[in-house]
Image (spheres, coloured by chain):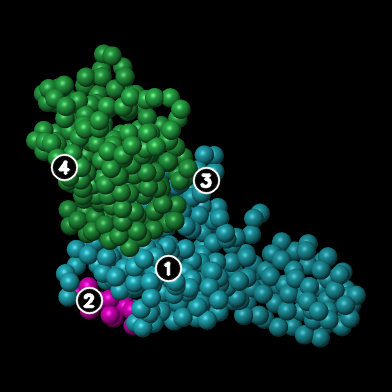
Amino acid sequence: MNSLFVFTLKELKEQIKTFKGIIIVIVLLLFGMTSPLLAKLTPEMLKMADLGVEIKIPDPTYIDAYAQFFKNMSQMVLIVVLLIYSNSVVNETLRGTAPLMLTKKLTRSAFIIAKFLSAAVVWSVSYVASALTCTLYTAYLFPNAPTAKLFLPLATMWLFGIITLAISILTSTIFKNYALAAVGGFCLWGLTLLTGSIPKIKDYSPAALASINVQLISGTLAPEKMLWPVLTGCIYTIFLIACACIVFRKREL
Amino acid sequence: MPLLEIKNLSKKYGSINAVSGLEMTVEQGSVFGFMGQNGAGKTTTLRMITGLANPTGGSISVCGTPVNFGSSAANRHIGYLPDVPEFYGFMRPREYLELCGKLYGMDKASISAKSSELLKLVGLENAKRTIGGFSRGMKQRLGIAQALIHSPELLILDEPTSALDPIGRKEVLDIIAALRGKLTVLFSTHILSDVERVCDTIGILHDGKLALKGGLEDILKKHSGQSVLLETLGCDRIHPLKAELKKLDYIKDLKEEAQGGLIVICSSAQRLYSDICPLLARLNIPLVRFERLESKLEDIFIEVTKDE
């Protein structure tokens, strides 16, 4: 337990000193700030573009701001996060820094869990800062925006980010080079999202955590509907990390 | 009881036997030179001792604690320096040693005192920059310090001098020499002069097995007198002599030297002493010089690792 804590702290320190964590914070803050602004300005920008045809665009609302935020998170931010963390284990095994740590009293499972926990801390801090920025800026740009009902849709997107991290840690453990780890992570992430399109399982799929957030805010979906995706999302995360631990314990270094 | 005990250890990579039925013990307090040609299986063996590689068969124990692949249980007894140590480049040497000490569960005061002592031992007490800017020699010295942070009983060094310049090599060997008597060192190398300088016991790995093991002095003594230098008058006389010597079953090798010199390596010096004078007389070759040579580790190494 002590070695897990020590190695997690080292990982956090590394993410700050190598700017990996700082890049994630900046990217997320940027999207948190620009999402409501983009929602507010899109109609104006289309008008100014003068496309030669008359386009009727309804006035933007706070729902558009959050829709933009969730779209950015699920389509761009999580891909950046996936690519950044898919080299976390493979980098140590390829460079040869892992053997020196693993010949101390650090277990292989603790090594993997520390990688995941530190990534989760950076993601959580960045996401909270980004969501808070988005909420405050949305409230400023759209004065009638409610702040109630926001916790669940924001929390489910956070959980999907945690799943994304678990995917990147697993593929980083399975594959022995950077490119394969990144491509493998992207494929598994895509497959996870695809389960949200399969009729029989879509209501239970963790993919729902990143796709029906706006419906929760607009009130067109009951919060109870998220129970299964949250549950399967948690189980899926534990499963991915357990698989990473098992694979790493069998890996010769 | 030996500090390190290896029984019937084997490791296969596909159809290749990297290590095959290795039996080896390392006694407490010794500086054990673990020798072998490139690819002999030295690094594989060391990786199995540290639990980084999975043996195909056999067992290893360190201070009575069995080594299991992927487990860190026996690591408290071991300090390990791989052949090319890599560190976290963003850290400073003291920071890295602190991380290692914390991973062993040491308290803050012990880590601080031990770090200062070790940084002084390896000559890095004034190195304030990050490890990313270190030379190879500095990394090797830091590698020794991190391996010693928890005062292990067994220090395993995998070819610590092979990639260093003469100054870096001397510095690392001086550190190893300074550790003599304080702990047990298992020192893998193929640089024989390094072994002669710091080791008191040697083991030569060949074909995945320990082909020779013993005290360095004993081995050198046992093999002394097995090489003889003959010098004849005129180079042309050496060829018939070589041809005749080759016929003798106890002659192992013949090396021609300049100006009619011939080094004869044999398995029985006594028989050579009896046979050489009648042979020279029969061939009518005048002898200028006959000298019993002191055996070198290099000759022993070549003899042991020579494929039939």
Query: Which residue is under mark 3?
Result: B17
Q: Colour of chain B?
A: cyan
User: How far, Cα to Cα, is label 2 from label 4?
Assistant: 52 Å
User: How far, Cα to Cα, is label 1 from label 3?
Assistant: 37 Å
Tell me if mark 3 has few (under 14), some (14-19) or many (20+) residues whose alpha carbon lies within 10 angstroms of its own.
some
Query: Which residue is under mark 4?
Result: A139
Chain that appears green: A
- Contact between marks 1 and 2 (CB within 8 A): the answer is no
Amino acid type indicated by mark 2: Ser
User: How far, Cα to Cα, is label 1 from label 2?
Assistant: 22 Å
Task: Identify which residue is drawn at 17% across, 75% down.
Answer: B109
Amino acid type indicated by mark 4: Ala
Where residue A70 appears, as percent x and y from the top left, is 27, 35
User: On screen, A83 above or below A22?
Assistant: above
Query: Which residue is under mark 2?
Result: B112
Query: Which residue is under mark 1?
Result: B132
Sooner in the amino-acid sequence: mark 1 or mark 3: 3
